[in-house]
Image (cartoon, rainbow, N blue to C red):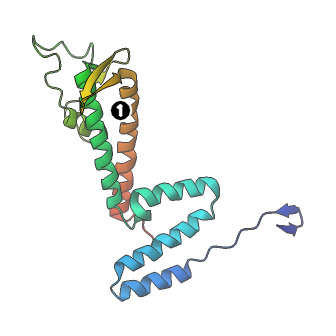
């Protein structure tokens, strides 16, 4: 704390990027890109740690998803994980009977399997990818009032439509965020060297 003309105020050490940039450029010129990336990520860790709680949260998100723009393929890995979890969730919902045709937009399916045409992997991709229409999500949605059971690896699992619906909303949001952050990382919009 330092005394100022208007009372006490908190002072934080000033951030200097020059040492990081010089070391990172040295590693790049020596052909050691992995070491340079570690230095640039450490620079961003230092920068965001000085921005308080919300700055730290934003920095943690950027580091985990794209390595501050230095590792944009991390967003791809997260995307694959979210799509896989969505695939398993929709498959469980289909087996438990909580997935329904949207109504009144779509008429009931023909006699036989009421879930004909629902493909859980395509559904998960359709929900996750913001600019792609695989003709699954507009036609199917979990019935929030229903629940059922399905068997997974020999165990009975209870599936509630309301929980599946909430997960799918979160997957839609994750799709928009991860897609945008991936594009920003790949195109260099989030990159500091």
Position of residue 118 in the picture relative to residue 34 (left or right): left
Residue at left 22%, top 24%? 95
Q: Quadrant of residue 35?
A: bottom left
Q: Quadrant of residue 64?
A: bottom left
The reply to whether residue 175 is visible in this rendering is yes
**Placement of the C terminus among the 4 image quadrants:** bottom left
| Residue 23 at x, y percent in the picture | 48, 84
Q: Is residue 64 above or below residue 41?
A: above
- From the viewer's side, name the closer residue of 115 and 179: 115
Residue at left 51%, top 79%? 20
For disc 1, the neighbor class at 10 Å (few under 14, some 14 to 19, many from 20) is: many
The reply to whether residue 139 is visible in this rendering is no
Residue at left 24%, top 26%? 151
Q: Is residue 18 above or below residue 86?
A: below
Instruction: Say which element carries label 1.
Output: helix
Q: Which residue does the numbered mark 1 point to in the structure image?
A: 168
| Residue 8 at x, y percent in the picture | 86, 62
Residue at left 33%, top 44%? 82
| Residue 76 at x, y percent in the picture | 30, 54
């Amino acid at each position: 704390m330092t005394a100022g003309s208007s009372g006490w105020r908190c002072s934080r050490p000033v951030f200097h990027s020059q040492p990081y940039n010089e070391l990172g450029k040295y590693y790049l010129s020596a052909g050691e890109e992995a070491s340079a990336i570690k230095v640039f990520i450490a620079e961003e860790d230092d920068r965001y740690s000085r921005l308080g709680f919300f700055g730290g949260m934003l920095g943690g998100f950027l580091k985990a998803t794209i390595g501050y723009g230095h590792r944009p393929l991390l967003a791809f890995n997260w995307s694959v994980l979210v799509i896989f979890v969505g695939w398993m969730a929709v498959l469980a919902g289909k087996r438990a009977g909580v997935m329904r045709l949207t109504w009144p937009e779509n008429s009931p399916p023909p006699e036989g399997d009421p879930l004909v045409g629902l493909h859980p992997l395509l559904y998960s991709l359709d929900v996750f990818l913001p600019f792609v229409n695989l003709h699954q999500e507009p036609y199917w949605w979990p019935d929030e009032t229903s629940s059922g059971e399905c068997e997974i690896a020999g165990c009975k699992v209870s599936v509630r439509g309301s929980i599946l619906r909430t997960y799918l909303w979160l997957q839609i949001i994750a799709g928009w965020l991860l897609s945008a952050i991936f594009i920003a990382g790949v195109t260099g919009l989030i990159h500091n060297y």
